[in-house]
Amino acid sequence: MRAVDMLQKTTRMCGGHYETGLLWCNEELKLPNNRSQAERRLDSLKRKFSCDPGLEDKYRAVIDDNFAKGHARKMSAAEAAKKGPKNLVRTTLCCYQ
């Protein structure tokens, strides 16, 4: 019944398409601390960018597009300073018909 409740509460028309909540997401998903893994990934990307400046431009364009579309946002100083597990904010999914 959780899925039906989610559909009834979150489904709406958005720009000529239906938008609904993600049925398989928990309300508050606790994420493990993966800072060291993220820092290694960043170091790897920096090495790739130094070898291929065009790749960095393409990468930045995709990130900028995600910000422009509202799919990403910069964390506030308070959010960044928060200790402990971070929460994943549930988003919505557009279904095109």
Image: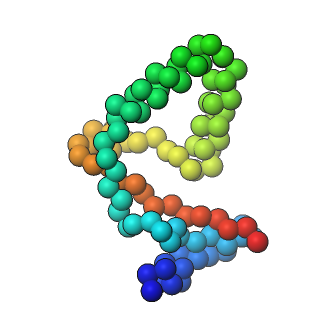
- Could you tell me which quadrant the N terminus lies in? bottom left
Residue 65 x %, y %: 65, 41
| Viewer can see residue 48 | yes
Query: For residue 77, which quarter of the picture?
Result: top left
Q: Is residue 58 above or below residue 11?
A: above
The one of 19 and 50 positioned closer to us in this rendering: 50
Q: Which scheme is used to colour this image of the protein?
A: rainbow
Residue 44 x %, y %: 50, 23
| Viewer can see residue 14 | no
Q: Which residue lies furthest to the left in this view?
A: 83
Residue 57 x %, y %: 67, 25
The mark tally for this picture is: 0
The one of 24 and 15 positioned closer to us in this rendering: 24
Q: Is residue 60 above or below residue 70?
A: above
Q: Is residue 48 above or below residue 30?
A: above
Q: Is residue 96 left or right of residue 73?
A: right
Q: Which residue is drawn at 46% across and 21% down?
A: 43
Q: Residue at x 58, y 72 (%)?
A: 20
Residue 17 x %, y %: 72, 70
Q: Residue at x 59, y 64 (%)?
A: 93
- Could you tell me which quadrant the C terminus lies in? bottom right
